């Protein structure tokens, strides 16, 4: 049978209001009364309900975190960074996964509002260039601080932490060009998201800066999903004049591409070269030497959470802060041009 504050009040010989003040450390209570109530609480092994306490204070000690794909290791590392700072700040986390669905993201925002959370960190799914009045109105009416990570929400001025995706993609493509590649294919991410657009822009910029024509036949539009990249790469491998190198724009895309490449018994870099955006840790563990652009995902999570903590502590409350982190290129040999000329 659950212990209630009524049981504590009765055993301590005090009112419900006095027990409530002791539990919430609010209002005046005589020291001897406070000690007596605390002893009863300990004797009865009573654990106060977080929900009940949040109702009395009209807020929780909790923040919401919304990501589009909890299975993706990139967002796992972002969450790791968020959690590390949250724990040090005495904050709890409610994690929501949207499966890259705009409808699920909107529902998550509404659910978190009902939970009386203090703030939200969100990696948005909603299209960066899309005007969604219901979505924007929901964000504006939440009345709590919101910090963006990885992706932007157009028509808003939220604080955020991002990665310089243009720079990362440019350097990845340029590494292939320096090896002698001229026929470089790209498998993009979901092109209604700013990270995907910026990575494609970086790829285009590298070609143009090196006087290499941008050919539509070497642009393959993906959606960040492993299965889509697998199907695209299967088709690429059947091309008569296929690219000599691929720049793949996300970690899950990398996995799908590699699966297709190895199924076709094609070797990297002897038959085709490849550079990926984002680290795939399992490849390093298994000894696959795939070159990649390393986006500082854990650091992004830490900075995003610290930004939110600062706002909650009234630091930089009225200042819009948008931090862009620089990625770094890790070359492991898969960019090399070893393809024999026919």
Image (tube, rainbow, N blue to C red):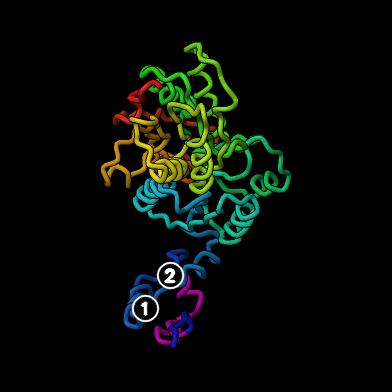
Residue 87 disc label: none
Q: Is residue 41 above or below residue 320?
A: below
Q: Residue 191 placed where, x, y %? A: 60, 36
User: Which residues fall within the magenta stretch?
Assistant: 7-22
Q: Determine crowd level at label 2: few under 14, some 14-19, many 20+ residues with C-alpha closer than 10 A.
A: some
Q: Is residue 252 above or below residue 292?
A: below
Q: Is residue 25 or residue 196 the one in the foreground?
A: 196
Which residue is label 1 attached to? 41
**Direction front: furthest residue:** 342
Q: Is residue 240 or residue 288 the one in the foreground?
A: 240
Q: Residue 176 placed where, x, y %? A: 40, 22
Residue under the image location 57 percent in, 39 percent down = 190
Quadrant of the rendering where the C terminus is positioned: top left
Give the CA separation, mark 2 to mark 1: 9 Å
How many numbered discs sit on the rendered protein? 2
Q: Secondary structure at mark 2?
A: helix
**Direction right: furthest residue:** 133
Which residue is label 2 attached to? 23
Q: Quadrant of residue 256?
A: top left
Drawn side of residue 110 relative to residue 209, left or right: right
Q: Is residue 163 or residue 285 the one in the foreground?
A: 285
Residue 25 visible in the shown view: yes
Residue under the image location 44 percent in, 88 percent down = 1
Q: Secondary structure at mark 1?
A: helix
Residue 9 magenta-drawn?
A: yes
Q: Residue 172 placed where, x, y %? A: 41, 26
Q: Quadrant of residue 124?
A: top right
Residue under the image location 41 percent in, 46 percent down = 263
Residue 317 visible in the shown view: no
Q: Residue 42 placed where, x, y %? A: 32, 78
Q: Determine crowd level at label 1: few under 14, some 14-19, many 20+ residues with C-alpha closer than 10 A.
A: many
Residue 60 magenta-drawn?
A: no
């Amino acid at each position: 049978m659950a212990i209630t504050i009524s049981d504590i009040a009765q055993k301590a010989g005090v009112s419900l209001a006095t027990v409530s003040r002791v539990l919430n450390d609010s209002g005046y209570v005589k020291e001897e009364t406070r000690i007596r109530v605390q002893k009863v609480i300990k004797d009865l092994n009573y654990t106060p309900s977080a929900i009940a306490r949040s109702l009395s204070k009209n807020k929780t000690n909790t923040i919401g975190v919304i990501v589009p794909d909890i299975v993706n290791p990139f967002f796992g590392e972002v969450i790791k960074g968020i959690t590390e700072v949250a724990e040090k700040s005495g904050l709890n986390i409610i994690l929501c996964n949207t499966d890259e669905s705009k409808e699920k993201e909107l529902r998550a925002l509404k659910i978190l509002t009902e939970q009386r959370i203090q703030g939200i960190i969100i990696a948005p799914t909603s299209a960066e260039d899309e005007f969604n009045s219901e979505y924007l109105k929901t964000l504006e009416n939440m009345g709590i601080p919101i910090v963006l990570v990885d992706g932007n929400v157009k028509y808003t001025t939220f604080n955020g932490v991002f990665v310089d995706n243009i720079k990362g993609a440019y350097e990845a493509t340029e590494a292939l060009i320096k090896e002698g590649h001229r026929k470089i294919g790209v498998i993009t991410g979901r092109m209604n998201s700013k990270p995907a657009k910026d990575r494609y822009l970086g790829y285009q910029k590298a070609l143009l800066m090196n006087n290499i024509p941008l050919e539509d036949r070497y642009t393959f539009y993906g959606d960040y999903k492993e299965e889509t990249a697998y199907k695209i790469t299967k088709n690429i491998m059947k091309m008569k004049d296929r690219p000599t190198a691929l720049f793949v724009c996300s970690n899950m895309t990398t996995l799908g591409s590699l699966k297709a490449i190895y199924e076709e018994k094609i070797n990297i870099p002897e038959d085709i070269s490849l550079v990926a955006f984002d680290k795939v840790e399992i490849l390093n563990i298994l000894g696959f030497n795939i070159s990649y652009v390393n986006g500082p995902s854990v650091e992004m999570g830490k900075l995003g959470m610290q930004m939110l903590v600062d706002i909650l502590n009234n630091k930089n409350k009225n200042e819009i802060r948008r931090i862009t982190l620089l990625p770094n290129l890790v070359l492991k040999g898969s960019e090399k041009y070893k393809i024999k000329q026919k």
